[in-house]
Image: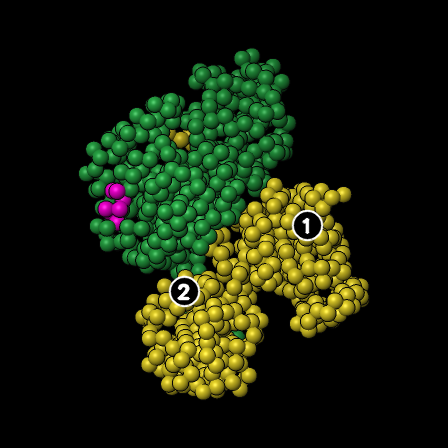
Chain colours: A yellow, B green
Amino acid sequence: MTIKAYMHELGSAAKLAAKRLALSDLSRRNDALKAIATAVNTSRQDILEANEQDLVKARANGLDAAAIDRLTLDDQRLDAMIASLQQVMTLADPIGRVDQVQPMPSGIRVGKMRVPLGVIGIIYESRPNVTVEASSLCIKSGNAVILRGGSESFFSNQAIARCIQSGLVAANLPEACVQVVDTTDREAVAELVTMNDYVNVIVPRGGKSLIERVAAQATVPVIKHLDGVCHIFVDETAETDMAVALVLNAKTQRYGTCNTLETLLVARAVAPSVLPPIAAALEAAQVELRGCEETRLLVKECRPAHEDDWYAEYLAPILAIRIVADITEAIQHIEHYGSHHTDAIITQNHGHAERFVREVDSSSVMVNASTRFADGFEYGLGAEIGISTDKIHARGPVGLEGLTCQKYVVYGTGQIRC
Amino acid sequence: MTIKAYMHELGSAAKLAAKRLALSDLSRRNDALKAIATAVNTSRQDILEANEQDLVKARANGLDAAAIDRLTLDDQRLDAMIASLQQVMTLADPIGRVDQVQPMPSGIRVGKMRVPLGVIGIIYESRPNVTVEASSLCIKSGNAVILRGGSESFFSNQAIARCIQSGLVAANLPEACVQVVDTTDREAVAELVTMNDYVNVIVPRGGKSLIERVAAQATVPVIKHLDGVCHIFVDETAETDMAVALVLNAKTQRYGTCNTLETLLVARAVAPSVLPPIAAALEAAQVELRGCEETRLLVKECRPAHEDDWYAEYLAPILAIRIVADITEAIQHIEHYGSHHTDAIITQNHGHAERFVREVDSSSVMVNASTRFADGFEYGLGAEIGISTDKIHARGPVGLEGLTCQKYVVYGTGQIRC
């Protein structure tokens, strides 16, 4: 069978399964999640052996330590998978609710019912826990899913997929609600993202090059997240202690995440008092500083920043620092160099806070909080399929609602249009 | 200047203008709409002369009567344009509202602010009133717009554009909030739909071939509407009088609209009593009937329907009729042959009504009402930029909200993430 024929078979099966899943009761969908958690728990040895197969190959291929770490499963990570399934079980049903039913002058009543999108395609890299997490969100939201994991985690994903299939069967739902592509051929991705008759939306999860490649190929709509070049602006009314704590947290709590701080902007009036303690805290955490000329006059150890640094998503212990005249210049910098992901102001001035929130065109805009809070769990969504930097459909952290849409429902008593 | 350079100039100007428009007060946006209405009113002669230029060319090119009608402006249609501007003025501000601000366990408060998308590209055919209607919705929702009208309405659109520009200037908003492409070269469209750096969404308005061409070329997200193959299912509990009235209205109130009835499904049990009066009413309205074999036994004048008829969007006085066993077969027919636009059931049975609403996967699903109600005005949206048959972002009639998105706003008091 050709890759194309194989993928169309998956697509067609997914579409059929999606219809049944969309109409299933919440209890049945939760039963499936529970049965998957049980299957993961009882299949630990099977999963860890499969993972070891992947790890042997990864070491032979010379993958770097970070990639090996992302790929590695152990009992603790399996516990986390099980906990995430239980967490999704506790969430309210995202589908079926009819909102805003209102009578119209014609006499009809019009409302909106939240319904699944249909079939979701997830394309991801080496982290095998995505197989469970993405599947659980799709099942809960009534969507069938086709998963295409990275070749590095091939055996792990297949082992996890067997647990998911058995859980679906135990809950009397079609196995094809979750299908894991069983080839690592890239043609499978090219096919998946262009099967508009079968797939309703694609969610790529991984590094920038993966996402760019998917977006360029796709004719199916993509919910995607590109760069996270996040800023904090410390204005002239900021409390120094708060500024130090927030910058330190936003930069160092985790280096590799999209909501990590990459550029610090400081109002000129407070730079002499605020920058030295911030720099001291960051240097103690072994963060390399790259600053504008004015910054370097205040912070000796700071290297010079170049034009590229203002655009950089370091994902590393490096921070760019620039002194700006005021909030206007800060907003201009963020609009010019930023990626519209997450940006924060530290201020005690109400007008500045409101202006920053209103004018900065990013998926999350914050006042006096760490950019690291841009996350589905921290926002109370209960789960997260990803963070969207698109403006269409879903923006910012995407929870279950991002995997649904609304249809209009109209109740009449025989009304005709005049 | 090349077409590409010209379009990028429009895009760059639109993006700048969009920033100012997004931050403008509602009163200023409404002032612009009012000034545009005044300008249209005082420029009637100018607009009608330009329209006459288009009409002379259209007649010389042998355009058909329907196309000439769509193109023609007169005082009554200018009155309607002015009325539509006044209508949009009365609508609530779709942007700036912050919803659902809730405290989280960490202490941060998280909400969502509704904001404009940015720059909208509208691609349309011969109806020059779209120039005013689309512009007014974009201005109201804080979006800049680039309009590309059909070559047939070129002079009309330019004359209307002058009114819009003068209205924007009168309200002290950038002229580039609304720009009308001043070339009919198709390359301009190809450029518009791929300028991802400048354009946030494309809304094509027109026939199916236009929309398919735009969707195939576009890399910018498209809010689009393809076929409207709408169904009414008359179940075995339907009241005959209601069935006759709704079918007649849905089929004959207007033939050329996407929410017009194209296929009638009738439950076998009531076909002998319901079909003859429906057929009589439709034949009196000179609607051609094409039916399945069973239908033809009950309705003598009915021609045979072929497989193609079940897929057909006639947009004409033709109706396909099929007798089905029950609601299950009706839903299967709709899912197989339908276009997921608008479908209705006529029933007195509550369980059937609820099942139809839940199971039919269309942008509008109706009970005991004419499919012709699928419309932004009838749904209380106050306006309509189009009807989306996509599932992503906006589905069904799209009003001002479809031209906006939400960003997360986070208010803290110094919280860091643990």
Query: SS class of the residue under badge 1?
Result: helix
Residue A289, position in %: x, y? 49, 80
Q: Is residue A25 visible?
A: no
Q: Which element carries disc 2, helix, strand or loop?
A: helix
Chain under label 1?
Answer: A
Q: Which residue is mark 2?
A: A336
Type of the residue with mark 1: Ala
Q: Is residue B361 visible?
A: yes
Numbered tag placed on residue A188 in the rendering: 1
Q: Which mark is residue B9?
A: none
Mark 1 touching mark 2, by CB under 8 A? no
Q: Position of residue B147 (x, y in %)?
A: 37, 43
Q: Measured from the top left, where is residue A63 in percent x and y?
A: 70, 69
Q: Quadrant of residue A327?
A: bottom left
Q: Is residue A115 above or below residue B273?
A: below
Q: Mark 1: give few (<14), some (14-19) or many (20+) Cα within 10 Å.
A: many
Q: Residue furthest left?
A: B42
- Residue at horizontal 53 percent and vertical 86 percent from the top: A284
Left or right: where does residue A130 sit relative to residue A244? right
Judge left or right: residue B228 versus residue A418: right
Residue under the point 37% across and 24% down: B61
Looking at the picture, does residue A388 appear above or below residue B368? below
Q: Is residue B228 left or right of residue A184?
A: left
User: Residue visible at 24% across and 47% down?
Assistant: B167
Q: Which residues are magenta?
A: B162-168
Q: Magenta region's main secondary structure? A: helix
Quadrant in the picture for residue B411: bottom left
Q: Is residue B288 above or below residue A171?
A: above
Q: Earlier in the sequence, mark 1 or mark 2?
A: 1
Q: Which residue appears at 74% of the width and 62% of the height?
A: A156
Callout 2: chain: A
Amino acid type of the residue that numbered disc 2 sits on in the rendered structure: His
